[in-house]
């Protein structure tokens, strides 16, 4: 396999190092705008696209542009693409997978979800034999670090976030993590692979933890509950419920016990029941190792795992119901209130679709509103 | 793929059902001594061995004989073998893998460890890119059910065992589970795959939980410790430490939180760190699903994962040290005693090899002696 590597940042340098240890992988080009000290350096994407011996392009630039243009061009040129870029794949899922099918190129992104866990590959494997019924889990280490730190050490949100930033777990602009967009992308890719669908990313409800207060956390604790950010998707026939939301779990549950910046992701299948994967989700080597695993899988004849051969399914978040903790200054909370909890209320059971509509309305009235689903079972 | 299925018990019937759902798998023969109502039934192994169109033999008879004779004959005939029989593979590991290499047949047993988890396949995959440093975990649902029940509900050993038997988690003769032999076989297969070795099964120390008392459990609890049965293997250069022992873990740890008959198995690799797999380890469908997964992998060109290409390594349990809880009437416990804990003592740090020698000596003096390693970290 002769590789054009796009990007030589943290992940790219890891891929470069691990790929060199593989007999059958040769990195012929490294594309970077900087003058990095590797002999394979080029500043021209055309060097890679126009070299007929390059069969595989590995994209670890991150971001949407020029990743999108480069990956599209590579697929159009019939070259296989391996990427760790969840933002790219989630945003252009249908277009890129259609392009790959059209030109016969392979397209893989195992490293995009769960870093070292190999989660998408595991989903791909299990669904060969039995239908996946649901997926669920802690898919973002940054928010789990913040939530753990608030729950265990009584920190307020800002302090917990600052600590995560100081440790390099959170970016200077943490929005993608704390508003749930990173989880949204991972959930979308997981659901698409698990259920052979292409869900509309912009229609999946996402509630973040930006507005969570230490008083909220204290109220949860008084009821034996721990707040975790979960991505959830469940298929019922031709419909899929999918959503990202802070979720209150019993403190004895395994999910509630996930510490620091760890991930815990589970699938449930028709015959084998629930299976969970636990590990640190990100970092140079776990991500780079999974990129190299994708290259080896390609070499062994595995192609896309985005088959999309099944019937189209629709997103329906009326399928899922929860009681919610809702804290807002808006008087609308009275309409759904069942009892009081700390500064907020516990609502009557609402569908995720109803809650999503309510949160959209509240956004204009109360920029500090916070909601979390209550999941008193596992 | 045309399959000869050996055995139509719980697992065999599951394999039969799941294989029929696969377009490319055809079960042509089902070997069973009983008159079961399937059209593929035969009582003659020769029907399968002498049919040149049967390319794969699936062995789910269990036990050593006639499984050993049938599997050997199938491999000698150049037929691929897929088995869920850990006892068979662990006992004849070198012989059967050598036979498969000689005739070019594939030989896989993913279902032998961790039931639905696909653990051996995950190990096989990860080691393509990075060395595995260690494996560790709860590999037996029966003992975990007993230990959880003793710790959480204060039951004594016999009552907890009876409950496990009533629920079908434990056999009428529970020895293989409670004396650790089931874990020994799983650990051996895991270590052999992870480290490309062939460890001597009879030299690996195994301490069981047969002699554990509710007073012991109470003493552990007073120190914030929970007892779990662990299989552990760690490679250091050309040496491997491998052992099965009851282990005392801090009650807040994730491993200590594993409930009921669940398994939690982890590997640690050079680049990606620790990764854990959590699920129910056994049962008809999880095991059958993994057998069928092995068949599909064979069909996709995957062969043995028992490469044994590396240098020979030796077993060395001087590499691992623990303090032990030891309860025995023998005066020998005074020689290793550092402090008292309940009915027993906490020893000074001992190597697993030393403790193994001591337990062998004690066996003659005190049939009720019990030992557990203290692992005060994760």
Image: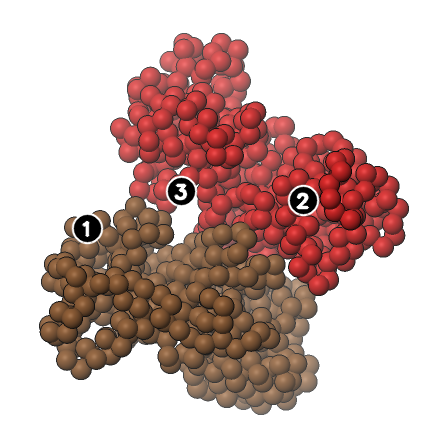
Chain colours: A brown, B red
- What chain letter is assigned to the residue under label 2? B
Front residue of B243/A43: it is B243
- Vertical placement of A117 versus B370: above or below? below
Q: Which residue position is annotated with label 2?
A: B12
Q: Which residue position is annotated with label 3?
A: B258
Question: Which residue: 44% across, 17% down?
Answer: B369
* Separation of marks 2 and 1 at Cα, in angstroms: 47 Å
Q: How crowded is mark 2: few (under 14 residues within 10 Å), some or many (20 or more)?
A: many
Classify mark 2: helix, strand or loop. helix
* Separation of marks 3 and 1 at Cα, in angstroms: 23 Å
Q: Which residue position is annotated with label 1?
A: A223
Please name which of the two marks, 3 or 1, marks the residue nearer to the observer: 1
Expressed as whole percent of the image width and height from the top left, the position of residue A240 reads 44, 70
Please report contact status of discs 3 and 1: CB closer than 8 Å, yes or no.
no
* Separation of marks 2 and 3 at Cα, in angstroms: 29 Å
Expressed as whole percent of the image width and height from the top left, the position of residue B68 reads 75, 35
Please report contact status of discs 2 and 3: CB closer than 8 Å, yes or no.
no
Left or right placement of residue A214 versus residue B123 in this view: left
Front residue of B127/A307: it is A307
Expressed as whole percent of the image width and height from the top left, the position of residue A180 reads 32, 71
Question: Which residue: 55% across, 29% down?
Answer: B171
Please name which of the two marks, 2 or 3, marks the residue nearer to the observer: 2
Count of numbered badges drawn on the protein: 3
Question: Which residue: 66% across, 81% down?
Answer: A104
Q: How crowded is mark 3: few (under 14 residues within 10 Å), some or many (20 or more)?
A: many
Expressed as whole percent of the image width and height from the top left, the position of residue B289 reads 61, 52
- Vertical placement of B279 versus A362: above or below? above
Classify mark 1: helix, strand or loop. loop
Please name which of the two marks, 2 or 1, marks the residue nearer to the observer: 2
* Residue B169 visible (yes or no): yes
Residue A372 sits in quarter: bottom left
């Amino acid at each position: 396999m002769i590789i054009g590597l796009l990007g030589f940042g943290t992940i790219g340098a890891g891929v470069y190092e691990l790929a060199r240890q593989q007999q059958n992988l040769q990195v012929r080009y490294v594309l970077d705008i900087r003058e990095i000290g590797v002999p394979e350096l080029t500043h021209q994407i055309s060097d890679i696209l126009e070299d007929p011996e390059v069969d595989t392009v590995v994209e670890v630039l991150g971001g949407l542009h020029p990743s999108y243009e480069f990956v599209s061009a590579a697929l159009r040129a019939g070259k296989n693409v391996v990427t760790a870029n969840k933002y790219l794949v989630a945003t252009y899922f249908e277009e890129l997978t259609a392009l790959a099918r059209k030109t016969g190129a392979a397209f893989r992104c195992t490293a995009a979800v769960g870093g070292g866990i190999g989660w998408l590959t595991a989903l791909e494997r299990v669904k060969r034999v039995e239908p996946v019924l649901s997926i669920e889990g802690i898919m973002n280490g940054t928010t789990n670090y913040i939530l753990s730190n608030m729950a265990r050490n009584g920190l307020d949100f800002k302090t917990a976030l600052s600590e995560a930033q100081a440790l390099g777990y959170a970016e200077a602009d943490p929005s993608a993590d704390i508003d749930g967009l990173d989880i949204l992308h991972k959930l979308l890719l997981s659901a698409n692979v698990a259920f052979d669908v292409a869900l509309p990313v912009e229609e999946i409800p996402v509630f973040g933890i930006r507005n969570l207060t230490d008083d909220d956390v204290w109220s949860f604790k008084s009821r034996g509950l721990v707040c975790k950010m979960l991505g959830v998707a469940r298929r019922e026939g031709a419909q899929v419920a999918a959503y990202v939301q802070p979720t209150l779990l019993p403190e004895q549950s395994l999910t509630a016990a996930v510490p620091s910046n760890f991930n815990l992701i589970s699938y449930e299948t028709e015959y084998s029941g629930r299976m969970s994967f636990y590990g640190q989700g990100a970092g140079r080597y776990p991500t780079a190792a999974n990129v190299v695993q994708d290259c080896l899988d390609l070499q062994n004849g595995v192609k896309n795992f985005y088959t999309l051969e099944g019937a189209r399914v629709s997103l329906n978040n009326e399928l899922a119901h929860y009681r919610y903790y809702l804290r807002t200054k808006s008087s609308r909370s009275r309409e759904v209130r069942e009892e009081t909890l700390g500064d907020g209320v516990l609502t009557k059971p609402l569908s995720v679709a109803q809650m999503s509509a309510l949160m959209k309305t509240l956004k204009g009235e109360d920029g500090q509103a916070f909601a979390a689903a209550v999941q008193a079972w596992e």
